[in-house]
Image (cartoon, rainbow, N blue to C red):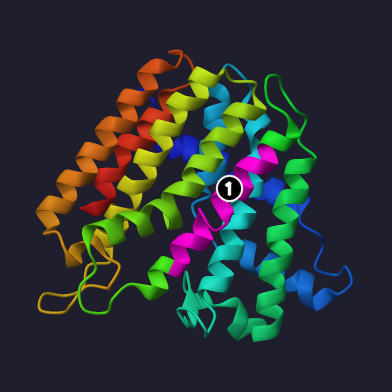
Amino acid sequence: MFDLTTYLTERRRQVEAELDRLLPPATDEPPALHAAMRYAVFTGGKRLRPILSMAAAEACGGRAETGLQPGCAVEILHTYTLVHDDLPCMDDDATRRGKPTVHIAFGETNAVLAGDALQAFAFELLGRVPSASPWTTGNLVGELANAAGSHGVVGGQVADLSVPQDAPTPEQIDFIHLHKTADLFRAAVRLGAMAAGGTAAQVEALTCYAVNLGLAFQITDDLLDAPAPGQPPGETSCLSIYTPAAARARVSDRVGEAVAALSRCAETGIEALKAVAEYVPDRGH
């Protein structure tokens, strides 16, 4: 039987070591900037995006390590979005994962610049990834740029900040969940598949998997963050428009779609992806 806990622990260790190797030392000039970048990246996290990238490489017949650096690029870009999301001009959060946010620990200016530098570094890393036919380095860079920009995470963040305070519509919630969460899951999986030379059909199947997984993951996060009885949910929580039971049903539907998409890939290599998807509903209980 596949042991997901052991798999995630081992892969997370690989990712942590690679991130430590790739990021500039905190002592590099200017040290305040590089210390802030490393602080942001190493404040915890499941490292699920790079792990999915590695698993996608395996699902396309490649080695897991082929997806490691592309996955780290996604993780670094994801970290930049969190640094900026925490800023006073956005969510104004003082802590993340139990630690002071970057702008609290290093000052607002350094936090903005650390986020900028992390974003640039993510694309630098992708530029170093060897291409694998039929995909080019340009395909890899374009993939992450699409997930990061106005039609991706940035667009999702703008929608999140502008959603009506009274009652968001289902369409607004879906748009925010798709672009703030699912887009980077999609990028991580597609980049791992492309770096491994996956076929267009394999990449398309894994895209369907990743989008559904990302949406299920975000709905489950809303369930985990549900307020106490009698308290209103956050304005971009799906619980503002769905009951918990209906939200759990949506998670189940998305997980089913994700697992079904894997049937279009080779049997070898999909075990981890399937196990991750099937684990998501358990996070909400």
Q: Is residue 154 magenta?
A: yes
Q: Nearer the viewer, residue 256 or 153?
A: 153
Q: Nearer the viewer, residue 160 or 66?
A: 160
**How many C-alpha atoms fall within 10 Å of the one at disc 1: few (<14), some, or many (≥20)?**
some
Q: Nearer the viewer, residue 64 or 2?
A: 64
Rendered residue at 66%/48% (across/down): 73
Secondary structure state at the residue bearing disc 1:
helix
Is any part of residue 168 visible from this angle? yes
Residue extending farthest right:
29
Rendered residue at 56%/64% (across/down): 81
Q: Which residues are the magenta region? A: 140-158
Can you give x and y, in whole percent of width and height, for residue 220 in the image? 28, 53
Asked if residue 135 is positioned above or below residue 144 in the image, the reply reads above
Q: Quadrant of residue 4?
A: top left
Q: Quadrant of residue 277?
A: top left
Dominant secondary-structure state across the stretch colored magenta: helix
Please state if 196 lies on the left or on the right of 44 as rendered. right
Asked if residue 73 is positioned above or below residue 207 in the image, the reply reads below
Please state if 219 lies on the left or on the right of 270 as rendered. left
Q: Is residue 255 magenta?
A: no
Can you give x and y, in whole percent of width and height, for residue 187 in the image? 54, 42
Residue at the disc numbered 1: 146
Q: Nearer the viewer, residue 192 or 179?
A: 179
Kind of residue at disc 1? Asn
Is any part of residue 14 visible from this angle? no
Can you give x and y, in whole percent of width and height, for residue 149 in the image? 58, 56
Rendered residue at 48%/41% (across/down): 186
Can you give x and y, in whole percent of width and height, for residue 138 in the image? 73, 36
Figure quadrant of the N terminus: top left
Rendered residue at 22%/58% (across/down): 170
Asked if residue 77 is positioned above or below residue 279 in the image, the reply reads below
